[in-house]
Image (cartoon, coloured by chain):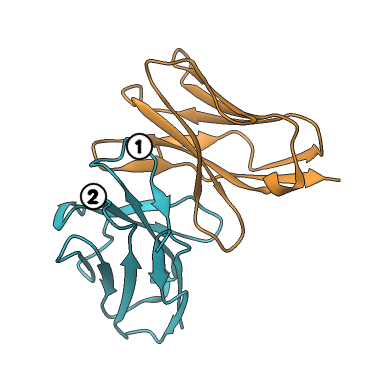
Amino acid sequence: GESVGLHLPTLSVQEGDNSIINCAYSNSASDYFIWYKQESGKGPQFIIDIRSNMDKRQGQRVTVLLNKTVKHLSLQIAATQPGDSAVYFCADRLDDYKLSFGAGTTVTVRA
Amino acid sequence: GAGVSQSPRYKVAKRGQDVALRCDPISGHVSLFWYQQALGQGPEFLTYFQNEAQLDKSGLPSDRFFAERPEGSVSTLKIQRTQQEDSAVYLCASSLVAGANTEAFFGQGTRLTVV
């Protein structure tokens, strides 16, 4: 079965607002987590990653938070733009060669 | 090329036909992954290559699925005697270093429809 899962399948957000996408994982031994963005008809695109020895990591307009106590991962997008509309996947590393992806959250940005 | 290239982009196969899906990874990338993505779902791991060595094929659904990367660059995923449940997008990804602990670059995928 899947190691990770997302709390909500869809998220609608007003342009300019901040978005928060949540993800729960079940494998307490997971040591690497990654967020991907997938636009319609395209392959997943890397957003940001975090290792288990960190609680927070920031990129350009994005922040990933990791709470190992409750096995929860979140992706925050600041000042959401229309180009952020996509499906967002979290994934964790099951072993040396394998990532386990969740089902995805579809983010729709309202103008 | 600049990114991971997959061909064909779309493939329609009659049930029972064999298909071959090609992946051109980013030049110099050690790792190559194949994933299967069903409609509305996240990608599911199929197999992993480190250079020409297939180190993990635990995700291949059946012995009808076969993958190779003979020279450590281009890879082919072959599906024999296709069935309707094989309909999905097949994604290829590559990364610079060994293992699944760093950013991987995905191709656009091949959408396979079995009729």
Query: From mark 1 to mark 2, how far is it between C-alphas?
Result: 12 Å
Measuring 33% from the left and 60% from the top, which residue is drawn there? B25
Measuring 53% from the left and 61% from the top, which residue is drawn there? B39
| B41 lies above or below A35 | below
Instruction: Name the amino acid type tagged 2.
Output: Val
How many marks are shown on the rendered structure? Answer: 2
Q: Secondary structure at mark 1?
A: loop
The colour of chain A is: orange
The colour of chain B is: cyan
Residue holding disc 1: B102
Instruction: Name the amino acid type tagged 1.
Output: Thr
Residue A86 at what x, y percent from top left? 64, 49
Name the side, left or right, on which B107 lies relative to B18. right
Which chain is home to disc 1?
A: B
Residue holding disc 2: B30
Q: Secondary structure at mark 2?
A: loop
Locate residue B85: give its quadrant. Answer: bottom left
Q: Earlier in the sequence, mark 1 or mark 2?
A: 2
Which chain is home to disc 2?
A: B
Locate residue A101: give its quadrant. Answer: top left
Q: Is residue A1 visible?
A: no
Residue A85 at what x, y percent from top left? 70, 48
Measuring 29% from the left and 82% from the top, which residue is drawn there? B18
Residue A104 at what x, y percent from top left? 56, 44
